């Protein structure tokens, strides 16, 4: 995948400490106290009021009903590359045309990954155990196969403190590795794909990667090898062996088992090159040099209909576009509505969009708002931590973008004015804002929580169920129209509409955001060699590829 080359200066890179989406964090009240946002213009105030009144849970729910029906008619999902996604695209296009827009689509190819049956992971001796589906996860874009009973061989692991590890990252780690064995490796330093490639080159028939053991790196790894692991291109080689992730405790236990430890792995998966598309629609007017992209991914995972993830963001985005037309809003700045494809395959659609547009068109983008999961049933009100004051920055965009910090302040100020309690959440590249964030565009957005459990303090703040995931149906068949918090959904939709109005109606948007996509101008002065080195460095440092870990 080709990311737009950027000129963001990468200085000292902070250690990659993952903060789970929705992890407890400081209240935003301290941020509000020091927030000094300019007063909204009269047009922004009027536009915000009109949109917040017009956009209702009932209106968005009608779109969600349509998306649920599409999933029901197409095997229970709306995954990119399959019929359910195509029908979702047609629904959005029909709604936009009926509202008076002239939408376009950007078609792109990508590699899908789908498990055809449940995977198997077993320890056969000395302690027989068949792992449950909660105790391990197949890495997406894993190879397929049945290893049969094989010896499990640890590869250069480190169980000490700290658990720094480059296990499996170098061919030398496999010196003396018995061909045919299953490689047991530890997370750390390089990508999971690199570990799998090295293991396969050494003759391994399967690879188990356990978590690193440092704070935040102990649970079962939900990882990906990336679509390049199955794209047919020899550089890097495709992965042809089963690859799974387990937690640190189980990995440590296997390392310390009496020799020989034997086990079995089975992965039955299919990867195909398919087509997907993004849907794009611009307002008819507004300054074309101050574009705000309001984005949401339209696809689901293959496992379910994806009504919260991310029908909820897509339905809000669609209703926002429709109501801007119905309310006869003529924004000062152009607004571009985008529904991204193949987010669940690794942010493919948004990344393809950023890579495809010209430098001149990219320079016109001042801001990106991202809405991914707004109606989680055990609801939370999270704002992306644009100034990184509460959560670590991603390695691919380690410097604070003043515009992203401003967008966060705008959200904080709005919700404080409404008496709605919020928290910052990691702005770590797990959704479609990433290619914009990486390339210097001011980005921000809202989120209602995913797989992380609601803490005691969050229960006191928002109610719901303590100790239960914000969305227990995340990436599951139960992500349906019956498992939503519609009141919380409308609350976040109001905040999204308000900040969209601020950006759309600010005649000095670049000044307010501190320059917007200033990286584009700087990037033009890089040599081709510098661009290639920067691109390669960012690719190596990327922690997440969509909702899954890549390293």
Image (tube, grey):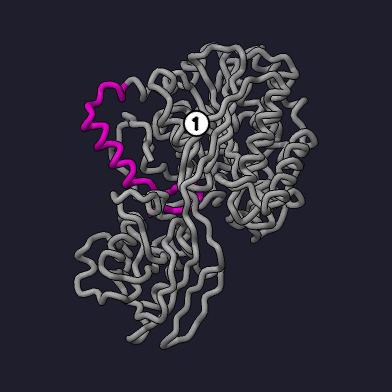
- The quarter of the image holding the N terminus is top left
138 to the left or right of 528: right
**Front residue of 446 and 208:** 208
Give residue 69's position: percent from left, percent from top: 74, 45
**Residue 445 placement (x, y as % from top left):** 57, 35
What secondary structure is found at the residue carrying circle 1? strand
Against 144, is 261 above or below? Answer: below
Q: Position of residue 183 (x, y in %)?
A: 33, 71
| Quarter that holds the C terminus | bottom left
Q: Which residue is mark 1?
A: 443
Residue 190 part of the magenta segment:
no
Q: Residue furthest right?
A: 58
Highlighted magenta segment, given as a residue range? 522-551
Of residues 433 and 204, which is closer to you in this image?
204
* Identity of the residue drawn at 37% across and 37% down: 2
Res. 237 in view: yes
For residue 9, what is the image quadrant? top left
Please tell me in which quadrant of the rendered image residue 96 appears: top right
Query: Residue at point 47% right, 26% down?
Result: 403
Q: Residue at x 22, y 26 (%)?
A: 527
């Amino acid at each position: 995948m080709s990311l737009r080359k950027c000129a963001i200066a990468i200085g000292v890179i902070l250690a990659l400490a993952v903060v789970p989406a929705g992890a407890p964090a400081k209240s935003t009240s301290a941020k509000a106290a020091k927030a000094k946002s300019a007063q909204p213009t009269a047009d922004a105030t009027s536009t915000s009021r009109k949109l917040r009144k017009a956009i209702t849970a009932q209106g968005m729910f009608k779109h969600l009903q349509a998306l649920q029906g599409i999933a029901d008619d197409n095997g229970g999902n709306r995954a990119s590359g399959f019929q359910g996604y195509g029908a979702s695209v047609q629904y959005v296009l029909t709604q936009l045309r009926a509202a008076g827009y002239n939408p376009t689509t950007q078609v792109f190819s990508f590699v899908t990954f789908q498990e055809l049956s449940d995977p198997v992971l077993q320890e056969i001796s000395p302690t027989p155990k068949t792992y449950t589906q909660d105790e391990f996860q197949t890495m997406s874009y894993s190879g397929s196969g049945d290893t049969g009973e094989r010896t499990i061989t640890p590869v250069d692991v480190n169980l000490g403190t700290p658990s720094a590890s480059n296990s499996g990252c170098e061919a030398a780690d496999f010196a003396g590795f018995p061909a045919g064995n299953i490689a047991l490796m530890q997370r750390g330093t390089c990508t999971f794909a690199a570990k799998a490639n090295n293991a396969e080159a050494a003759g391994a028939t399967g690879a188990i990667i356990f978590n690193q053991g440092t704070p935040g790196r102990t649970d079962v790894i939900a990882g990906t090898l990336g679509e390049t692991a199955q794209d047919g291109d020899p550089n890097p080689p495709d992965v042809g062996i089963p690859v799974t992730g387990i937690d640190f405790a189980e990995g440590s236990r296997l390392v310390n088992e009496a020799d020989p430890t034997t086990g079995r792995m089975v992965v039955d998966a299919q990867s195909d090159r398919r087509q997907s598309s993004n849907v794009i629609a611009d307002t008819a007017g507004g300054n074309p040099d101050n574009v705000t992209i309001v984005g949401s991914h339209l696809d689901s995972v293959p496992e379910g209909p994806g009504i919260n993830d991310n029908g909820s963001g897509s339905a809000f985005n669609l209703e926002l576009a429709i109501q801007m037309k119905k309310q006869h809003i003529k924004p000062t700045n152009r607004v571009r509505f985008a529904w991204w494809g193949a987010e669940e395959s690794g942010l493919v659609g948004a990344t393809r969009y950023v890579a495809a547009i010209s430098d001149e068109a990219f320079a016109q983008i001042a801001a990106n708002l991202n809405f991914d999961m707004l109606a989680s049933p055990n609801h939370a009100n999270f704002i992306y931590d644009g100034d990184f004051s509460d959560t670590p920055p991603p390695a691919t965009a380690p410097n604070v973008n003043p515009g992203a910090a401003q967008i966060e302040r705008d959200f904080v100020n709005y919700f404080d004015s409404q008496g709605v309690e919020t928290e910052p959440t990691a702005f770590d590249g797990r959704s479609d804002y990433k290619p914009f964030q990486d390339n210097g565009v001011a980005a921000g957005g809202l989120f209602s929580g995913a797989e992380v459990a609601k803490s005691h303090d969050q229960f006191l703040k928002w109610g719901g169920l303590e100790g239960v995931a914000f969305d227990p149906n995340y990436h599951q068949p139960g992500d349906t129209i019956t498992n939503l918090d519609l009141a919380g959904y409308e609350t976040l939709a109001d905040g999204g509409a308000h900040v969209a109005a601020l950006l759309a109606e600010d005649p000095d948007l670049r000044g307010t955001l501190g320059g917007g996509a200033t990286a584009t101008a700087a990037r033009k002065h890089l040599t081709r060699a510098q661009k290639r080195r920067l691109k390669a460095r960012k690719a190596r440092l990327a922690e997440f590829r969509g909702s899954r870990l890549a390293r």
